[in-house]
């Protein structure tokens, strides 16, 4: 797979500054949803770059360092748990992605967005863009963004949230709906970091 094909298409069309955008943490029961936007130098070498989900935690950490060192610009943003509950996860994802784009210190002319959704009922990607299904495995810029978003979220959940609410084992499951996580919910009930709208099935079983 040529990870630069989508970027090259934009450069060939006269677009100078292209960013890749991806999010992490849409599915967990707890914690914010994170997004990252990355502008890479043209065809920069980043050994092992791929969709963050296909990489080990160690490799993601290594690439995080390489990407943040080599990127022309990068930004990580998030939508909070309360925002996810107040709107919905789609709108929160879009909001986090636009926040990441807006956080770049260089204004991108065009954004490559992972997935097939660029708007919800309340939020939309305002930057000129295209969506790419499974883009984190097809575009270098999106792959880089997927790694920054995933590593940033994992660090927050396993360090900050785990420290704040040690009884749930966040460092082990990163907020996802694992057997251990549900057992801890049964034992302790939800905490402020939990997404109330994601716990409806769990609550229904208990009632």
Image (spheres, helix red, strand yellow):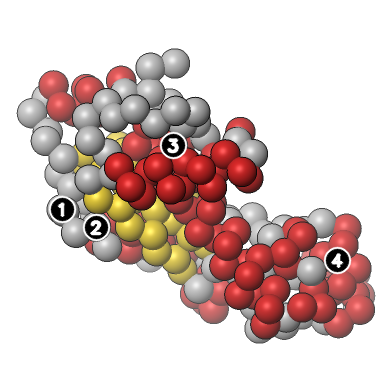
Residue at 22 percent of width and 23 percent of height:
8
> Which quadrant, please, contains the C terminus?
bottom right
Seen from the viewer's position, the closer of residues 56 and 143 is: 56
On the image, the x and y values in percent for residue 35 come to: 43, 56
On the image, the x and y values in percent for residue 4 come to: 31, 23
Q: Which mark is residue 182?
A: 4
Secondary structure of the residue carrying numbered label 1? loop
Q: Distance of mark 4 from mark 3, alpha carbons?
A: 31 Å
Instruction: Name which of mark 3 and mark 1 comes first in the sequence.
Output: 1
In this rendering, is residue 122 above or below 36? below
Q: Which mark is residue 143?
A: 3
Cβ atoms at labels 2 and 1 below 8 Å apart: yes
In the picture, measured across the screen, residue 37 lies left or right of residue 133, that is: left
Q: Distance of mark 3 from mark 1, alpha carbons?
A: 20 Å
Viewer can see residue 90: no
Q: Which residue is mark 1?
A: 107
Q: Which mark is residue 45?
A: none
In this rendering, is residue 95 above or below 38? below
């Amino acid at each position: 797979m040529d990870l630069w094909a989508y970027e090259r298409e934009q450069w060939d069309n006269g677009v100078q500054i292209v960013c890749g955008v991806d999010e992490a943490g849409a599915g967990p029961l707890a914690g914010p949803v994170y997004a990252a936007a990355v502008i890479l130098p043209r065809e920069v070498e980043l050994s092992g770059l791929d969709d963050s989900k296909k990489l080990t935690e160690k490799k993601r950490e290594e690439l995080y360092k390489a990407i943040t060192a080599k990127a022309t610009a990068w930004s990580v943003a998030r939508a909070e748990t309360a925002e996810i509950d107040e709107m919905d996860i789609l709108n929160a994802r879009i909001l986090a992605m636009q926040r990441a784009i807006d956080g770049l210190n260089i204004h991108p002319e065009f954004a490559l967005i992972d997935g097939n959704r660029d708007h919800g009922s309340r939020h939309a990607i305002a930057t000129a863009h295209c969506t790419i299904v499974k883009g984190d495995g097809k575009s270098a810029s999106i792959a880089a963004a997927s790694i920054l978003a995933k590593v940033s979220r994992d660090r927050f959940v396993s360090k900050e949230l785990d420290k704040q609410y040690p009884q749930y084992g966040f460092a082990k499951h990163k907020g996802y709906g694992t057997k251990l996580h549900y057992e801890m919910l049964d034992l302790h009930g939800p905490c402020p970091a939990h997404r109330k709208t994601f716990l409806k099935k769990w609550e229904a079983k208990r009632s």
